Amino acid sequence: MLAVPVRNYVPVCDAETGYQVTVEPASTVRDVSRRLGIPEQEVKLIMVEGVAASWDSVLSGNERVALFPPVGGG
């Protein structure tokens, strides 16, 4: 599931169920983001299975990936 304002990049993404993507073995979070057209600067926090991750985190399959945008305010 992707929890980014991906509606800007993946209009068919459902806010509740996310968007399922099939990727090649050993793909990284960066690979998935690029495939979906989500610019890295639009993402502040990456989670894989609820644990903080990085762009280079390798996916083994069936993980839930969440990409969160920077939050403004004060």
Image (cartoon, rainbow, N blue to C red):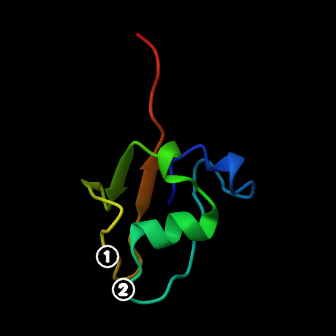
Q: Quadrant of the C terminus?
A: top left
Q: What residue type is labelled 1?
A: Val
Q: Where is residue 47 in the image (x, y as percent from the top left)?
A: 33, 54
What residue lies at 52% left-to-right and 44% top-to-bottom? 42
Q: Of helix, strand and loop, which one carries label 2?
A: loop
In this rendering, the answer to whether 30 lies above or below 42 is below
Q: Position of residue 32 (x, y in %)?
A: 51, 70
Q: Residue 58 carries which label?
A: 1
Left or right of 24 on screen, residue 11: right
Residue extending furthest toward the top: 74
Image quadrant assignment for residue 66: bottom left
Left or right of 11 on screen, residue 37: left
The crowding category of the residue bearing disc 1, from other C-alpha atoms within 10 Å (few below 14, some 14 to 19, many at least 20), is some
Q: What residue type is labelled 2?
A: Ala
Q: Position of residue 73 (x, y in %)?
A: 46, 14
Is 28 in front, or is 60? 28
Q: Position of residue 55 (x, y in %)?
A: 36, 62
Instruction: Give me the C-alpha separation between circle 1 and circle 2.
Output: 6 Å
**Are discs 1 and 2 less than 8 Å apart at CB?**
yes
Question: Can you identify the residue that label 2 sits on?
Answer: 26
Residue extending furthest toward the left: 51
In this figure, what is the number of numbered marks? 2
Left or right of 56 on screen, residue 36: right
What residue lies at 47% left-to-right and 21% top-to-bottom? 72
In this rendering, the answer to whether 13 lies above or below 43 is below
Q: Of helix, strand and loop, which one carries label 1?
A: loop
The crowding category of the residue bearing disc 2, from other C-alpha atoms within 10 Å (few below 14, some 14 to 19, many at least 20), is few
In this rendering, the answer to whether 1 lies above or below 63 is above
